[in-house]
């Protein structure tokens, strides 16, 4: 089952919410291609996921600075960690011989990677967007 966007995923900023929806879409696509074990397409979708995540992280941090979110440096470190984990997961799959057992683990990691960050870390931005809705 793909991850579906829900209203309670919203951090109260249209640009960030739009990015998160786009990221969820690419994660869903990555999982579909993973299930097909289509390595060429997987590498392509991974590239898009990595590039979009990197672009999103950059503008999210820029916005955090603009709204004076005090924990932007620690948050940026979490983003770097996520990109490192994403790379490690993908490389393990590409190099792996036991791909069948890696698939559910990868799906779990990827969903945790994305949803935990959005719901626990990005959600801390929500109070800062109140009254700053025109900033984005
Ligand atoms: Fe985010
Ligand atoms: Fe974030």
Image (tube, rainbow, N blue to C red):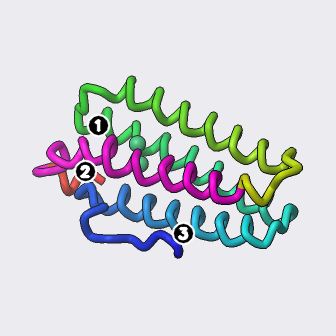
- Whichever of callouts 2 and 1 sits on the residue coming sooner in the sequence is 1
Of the 4 image quadrants, the one containing the C terminus is bottom left
Q: Nearer the viewer, residue 66 or 9?
A: 9
The residue at the point 25 percent across, 50 percent down is 135
Mark seen at residue 25: 3
Residue located at (23% from left, 32% from top): 68
What is the x, y in percent for residue 125? 25, 43
Identify residue for label 1: 66
Relative horizontal placement of residue 42, taking residue 121 as reference (left or right): right
Q: From this view, report whether residue 41 is shown above or below residue 120.
A: below
Between the residue at mark 1 and the residue at mark 3, the CA separation in whole angstroms equals: 27 Å
Relative to 74, say whether 112 is above or below.
Answer: below
Q: Determine whether the beta carbon of the residue marked 3 sits less than 8 angstroms from the nearest atom of ligand 1.
A: no
Q: Residue at x 57, y 44 (%)?
A: 54
Between 54 and 103, which is closer to the camera in this rendering?
Answer: 103
Distance from the alpha carbon under mark 2 to that under mark 3 = 26 Å
Check whether the beta carbons of the residues at disc 2 and disc 1 lie within 8 A of each other.
yes
- The mark found on residue 135 in the picture is 2
The reply, left or right, for residue 69 in relation to residue 62 is left
């Amino acid at each position: 089952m793909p991850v579906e966007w829900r209203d309670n995923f919203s951090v109260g900023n249209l640009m960030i919410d739009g990015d998160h929806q786009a990221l969820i879409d690419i994660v869903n696509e990555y999982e579909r291609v993973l299930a097909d074990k289509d390595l060429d397409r997987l590498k392509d979708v991974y590239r898009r996921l990595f590039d979009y995540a990197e672009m999103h992280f950059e503008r999210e941090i820029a916005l955090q600075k603009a709204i004076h979110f005090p924990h932007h440096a620690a948050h940026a470190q979490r983003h770097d960690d996520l990109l490192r984990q994403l790379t490690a997961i993908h490389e393990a799959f590409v190099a792996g011989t036991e791909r069948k057992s890696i698939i559910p683990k990868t799906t779990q990691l990827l969903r945790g990677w994305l949803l935990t960050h959005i719901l626990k870390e990005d959600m801390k931005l929500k109070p800062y967007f109140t009254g700053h809705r025109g900033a984005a």
